Image: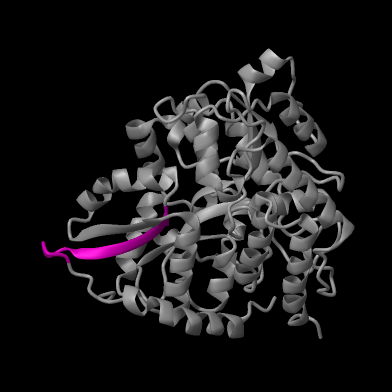
């Protein structure tokens, strides 16, 4: 597949202007105490916050290095990391990327090939990574990023509320069943939503669950000839279903709720269900972080009329930009934070339910983790293992990706479409109006791929 070097060159030129101020002093890698500073850009999710809490162990092992984290909310982190890598600014030594960016950036020559380093590092065991995760971070058969955690999607639900309402959650629910249960459990008087769903603009925010719903309804972004399909009956049905579900039974202010906000709402007991990443389970089961610990059940991703479950495959991973002046130290940090030993460190210091999930197969063989993750561990492993990102829809597509379209233009296209859908959720426009504009955006991109 053509990963669009011309497109990324345009991104680089546009981003250079934005980075002029923020890159001042980017080449200064010395600290006041004589140690070299390793600059690590991450997303501010709970597992990454745990990494920052434990980094002292790495610094003890590498006394000549001090780690400086740049931790930002998901949308901001994506923008800043993309701008830095695309422009070659050298602003970061380690960057958090996903299985969307990694093959594209590797094809453009922006990332170090980590495969040989993985093989040469004693005990690292790259073959222990879950195969679907390992393959998603590879380009031409070689890994260019190491998974920190992997995820698919599950439907989280309050077992106690279901019991009180006389409801039973099917192991494999349909979206219609989810909507029916949300209607019965929604309680405005007590401030409890029937379900929490993302509505925040961002290709990795609202578009993640919405894309998987579109897939489950038999929709797609493009047909095999790259004709845009965002105004098709299947996409229209899915988009209306999502918007109506969150408007009728979702959390207040849903158009500004992303992953972190939904995790907080559900964890505080303000929603009866949440459809989102499996990475949320560890936080929800931590009594120090969650008011619903021990009360949560986990069902498989709902299925739509298209016959496919609304599952996804995603991994937050760590990569080394070609521009770093500290590639050896960068790899040492990645090897530490994605190793089997790091997982044990998390368990022993922060609780076994807090292990970064979905990266290594051996995680699910650890007795301590099996006990702590009994409610969700095997479902997560099974869900990640069964997804096929090469066939996102029941209809044929010319692209890969379940909650994204793996083409370089999706950074802009997905963001623009997400803004339209968020506006529909907020009531600023109708779903038809949002999809009409989204179709125009997609058609412009599709024209670049047609002969």
Task: Say left or right for 157 vs 89.
Answer: right
Residue most toward the left? 33
Q: Nearer the viewer, residue 14 or 332?
A: 14
Task: Say left or right for 272 vs 450.
Answer: left
**189 in relation to 280, above or below:** above
Quarter of the image for residue 18 reads bottom left
Residue 392 in sight here: no
Task: List x then y, in percent, for residue 309.
Answer: 77, 43
Instruction: Please report the residue visible at 43 percent of the width from the left and 44 percent of the height from the top.
Output: 47
Query: In which quadrant of the rendered image does the N terminus lie?
Result: bottom right
Residue 178 in sight here: yes
Task: List x then y, in percent, for residue 34.
Answer: 12, 65
Q: Nearer the viewer, residue 392 or 267?
A: 267
The residue stretch that appears in magenta: 31-43
In magenta segment, residue 219: no
Task: List x then y, in percent, for residue 303.
Answer: 79, 41
Query: In which quadrant of the rendered image does the C terminus lie?
Result: bottom right
Count how many numbered circles sit on residues in the image.
0
Task: List x then y, in percent, for residue 368.
Answer: 45, 27
Instruction: Please report the residue visible at 43 percent of the width from the left and 43 percent of the height from the top.
Output: 46
Magenta stretch mostly in which secondary structure? Answer: strand
Task: Say left or right for 39 vs 110.
Answer: left
Instruction: Please report the residue visible at 28 percent of the width from the left and 63 percent of the height from the top.
Output: 38
Task: Say left or right for 451 vs 411.
Answer: right
Q: Nearer the viewer, residue 133 or 271?
A: 271
Q: Nearer the viewer, residue 205 or 109?
A: 205
In magenta segment, residue 38: yes
**439 in relation to 73, above or below:** below
């Amino acid at each position: 597949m053509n990963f669009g070097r011309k497109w990324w060159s345009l991104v680089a030129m546009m981003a250079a202007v934005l980075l002029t101020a923020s890159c001042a002093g980017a080449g200064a890698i010395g600290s006041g105490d004589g140690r070299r500073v390793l600059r690590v850009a991450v997303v501010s999710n709970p597992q990454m916050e745990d990494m920052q809490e434990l980094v002292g162990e790495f610094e003890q092992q590498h006394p000549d290095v001090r780690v400086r984290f740049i931790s930002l909310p998901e949308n901001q982190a994506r923008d800043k990391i993309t701008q830095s890598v695309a422009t070659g600014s050298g602003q970061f030594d380690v960057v958090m990327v996903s299985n969307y960016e990694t093959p594209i950036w590797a094809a453009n020559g922006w990332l170090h090939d980590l495969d040989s380093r993985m093989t040469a590092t004693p005990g690292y065991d790259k073959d222990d990574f879950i195969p679907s995760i390992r393959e998603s971070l590879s380009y031409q058969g070689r890994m260019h990023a190491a998974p920190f955690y992997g995820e698919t999607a599950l439907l989280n639900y309050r077992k106690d509320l279901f019991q009180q309402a006389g409801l039973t959650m099917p192991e494999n629910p349909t979206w219609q069943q989810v909507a029916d249960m949300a209607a019965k459990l929604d309680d405005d008087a007590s401030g409890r939503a029937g379900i929490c769903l993302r509505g925040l603009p961002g290709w990795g925010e609202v578009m993640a669950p919405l894309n998987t719903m579109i897939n489950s309804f038999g929709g797609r972004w493009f047909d095999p000839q790259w004709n845009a399909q965002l105004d098709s009956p299947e996409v229209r049905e899915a988009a209306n279903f999502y918007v109506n579900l969150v408007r009728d039974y979702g959390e207040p202010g849903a158009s500004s709720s992303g992953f972190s906000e939904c995790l907080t709402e559900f964890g505080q007991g303000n929603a009866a269900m949440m459809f989102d990443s499996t990475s949320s389970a560890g936080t929800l089961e931590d009594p120090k972080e969650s008011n619903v610990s021990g009360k949560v059940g986990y069902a498989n991703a709902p299925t739509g009329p298209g016959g496919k479950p609304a599952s996804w495959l995603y991994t937050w991973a760590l990569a080394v930009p070609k521009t770093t002046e500290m590639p050896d130290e960068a790899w040492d940090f990645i090897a530490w934070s994605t190793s089997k030993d790091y997982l044990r460190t998390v368990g022993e210091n922060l609780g076994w339910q807090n292990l970064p999930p979905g990266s290594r197969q051996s995680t699910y063989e650890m007795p301590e983790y099996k006990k702590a993750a009994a409610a969700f561990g095997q479902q997560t492993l099974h869900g990640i293992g069964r997804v096929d990102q090469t066939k996102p829809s029941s209809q044929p597509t010319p692209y890969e990706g379940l909650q994204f379209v793996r083409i370089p233009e999706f950074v802009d296209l997905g963001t623009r479409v997400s803004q339209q859908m968020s506006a529909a959720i907020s009531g600023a426009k109708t779903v038809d109006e949002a999809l009409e504009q989204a179709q125009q955006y997609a058609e412009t991109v599709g024209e670049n791929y047609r002969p």
